Image (cartoon, helix red, strand yellow):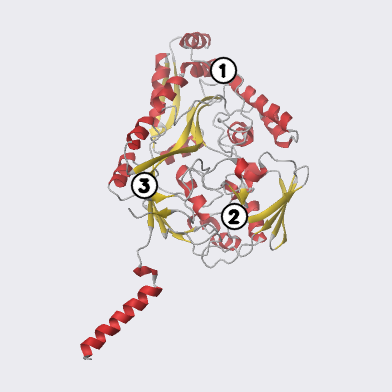
Amino acid sequence: MTKLTRQLALATTLLVGLASVSPGFAQDKVLRVGINTPEIKTLDPHRASATGEKGPMSWVFNGLVRFPPGSADPQDLEPDLAESWTSSEDGTEWIFTLRQGVSFHGDWGELTAEDVVYSLERAKDPERSSFAAAYEAFETIEAVDDYTVRIVLANPVPGFLGLVANYHGGNIVSKAAAEEAGQGFGTHPVGTGPFAFQRHDTQQQVIFAAHEDYFRGAPKIDQIVYRLIQADASRELAFTSGELDLIYGKREQRWIDRWDRDDSATVDVFWPAEYRTVHLNTKMEPLTDKRVREAVARAINVDEIVGFVGEDVGPKGCSVVPSGYLGEDCSAWIYDHDPEAVQTLLAEAGFENGVTIRSVVSANNAQLPIMEVIQAQLAQSGITLDMQVVDHPTYHEMTRNDLSGATFYGAARFPVADTYLTEFYHSDAIVGKPTAITNFSHCDVADEAIDAAKVEADPERQLEQWSEAQRLIHEEICAVPLFNLRQVWLRNNRVDYGYELEGELNLAPRITELTDLIEG
């Protein structure tokens, strides 16, 4: 054998050996996802509330229990980090037994009860959590041993298991990683989910890598590239050219119908809907006058708006509580479209020549077109909606600084009336307060009923309290309920979720260990 032949043989042997041990020589499966946001502010699960931030939470974190992939129905909740649980007869004491051998991402070790206690204490702390109000009844959270957690509640909590599910404050973080990162945990999140945070390129993308030690098995996808593309046209172009496999879609019936005709792609329309509501600032002129608020409510033609959006993607609501939530009451909480009544109400309020209302509006495609329709409807009745159109992050900042008279807002929450009533209509949630959440209307008429329902053990009486809260909010005209805007995503047919997608509380298709890219 010549020297050259020996060198070639050795090189071939090395290459074969390297290929057998190094994944770099294999073709990685990379799922490329496009979302409609210019930036991700936080990936801290106890802070992430914007649509673009919520999706990755289901990829990176787990709860004690979980909504199965493809479901947003509380009746489907199943074990996640907890393998079992028990509760007292009155529902005030819960004991969870944890799975053993669950590993955090990176070198952060095994999940123990100490991490669960830390995470739930963090979830109920207003200084560290945007969802603290939901955890007020958590009296004590303790580690009985390394794999047992006891939670004692001050009173029974509606939909308790939803608060320890893989959603919002129920997500479990690594205590050690969170304490080391401090305020920076949102840029270096550590969970136990099928994918681990890898890198964030500002205003470009966030990259997640497969968690090979995931307790349900190593993911079939090697990496998720989460592209930040706010413009609909740009996102759609990237999808059409093959640069993206899965994108946040346009929530309009015409757009859905167009893509339904494309055999290479699938449109997923799923629950929960983000409930679209116009909140009326009862502390800002001229909306301080209840007659003006009623005029606005009667000038808005919700049926016309639903026709514009499309009934399949935007079914009409009937109360200030979203459709399908436990406790929703559709008794009579709608103001009918009545232009003649609008004129009478404005005249009685001293605005015979019309009235102007200020509104901060997001340029987001899911908001601006609807507000333009509402602006035109109001104009027909002599109400001028002075819209200040800003980018979406600025909209969030300005509305939370109480700078808008009419605030169009969409949100999906755990589907129990309490969550929506507490966050949008309890006085503790009024924007500008230290305890502020999203009460843009300064509504404060239903506190007693909302609080009573929180501690009511009798389910029938609880429903009555929620109904009373909705009646009071309706009569005060704190808000005008519009429609439910369901989630719309578009995927290349190569993408196999590994489950049937009917719902996802985190508003984006869940990427699990079973999700795969099928070679065409």
Q: Earlier in the sequence, mark 2 or mark 3?
A: 2
Q: Is residue 137 left or right of residue 180?
A: right
- For residue 457, side relative to residue 443 (left or right): right
Examine the rendering and report whether any part of residue 299 can be seen. Answer: yes
Comparing labels 1 and 3, the label whose residue is closer to the camera: 3
1 and 2 marks in contact (CB < 8 Å): no
Q: Is residue 341 left or right of residue 232?
A: right
Which numbered mark, 2 or 3, is in the foreground of this view? 3
Question: Mark 1 sits on what residue?
Answer: 290
Mark positioned earlier in the residue sequence (1 or 2): 2
- Name the quadrant of the N terminus: bottom left
User: Which numbered circle lies on residue 172?
Assistant: 2
User: Which of the 4 image quadrants contains residue 422?
Assistant: top right
- The amino acid marked with disc number 3 is Asn
Q: Is residue 127 visible?
A: no
C-alpha separation, residue under disc 1 versus residue under disc 3: 52 Å
Q: Distance between the residues labelled 1 and 2?
A: 44 Å
Above or below, 327 against 55 in this view is above
The amino acid type, in three-letter code, at marker 2 is Ile
Which residue is tagged 3? 493
Q: Residues within 10 Å of mark 1 (few under 14, many from 20)?
A: some
Query: Percent x, y for residue 6?
Result: 25, 88
Element at label 2:
loop
Query: Residue 171, image x and y in percent?
Result: 58, 51
Task: Tell me where residue 10 appears, x and y as whole percent.
Answer: 29, 84
Marks 2/3: CA–CA distance: 33 Å
User: Would residue 95 appear left or right of 103 to someone viewing this image?
Assistant: right
| Label 1 element class | helix
Question: Residue at 57% of width from left, 27% of height from top?
Answer: 320
Mark 2 Cα-neighbour bin, 10 Å: few <14, some 14–19, many ≥20: many
Q: Is mark 3 on a helix, strand or loop?
A: loop
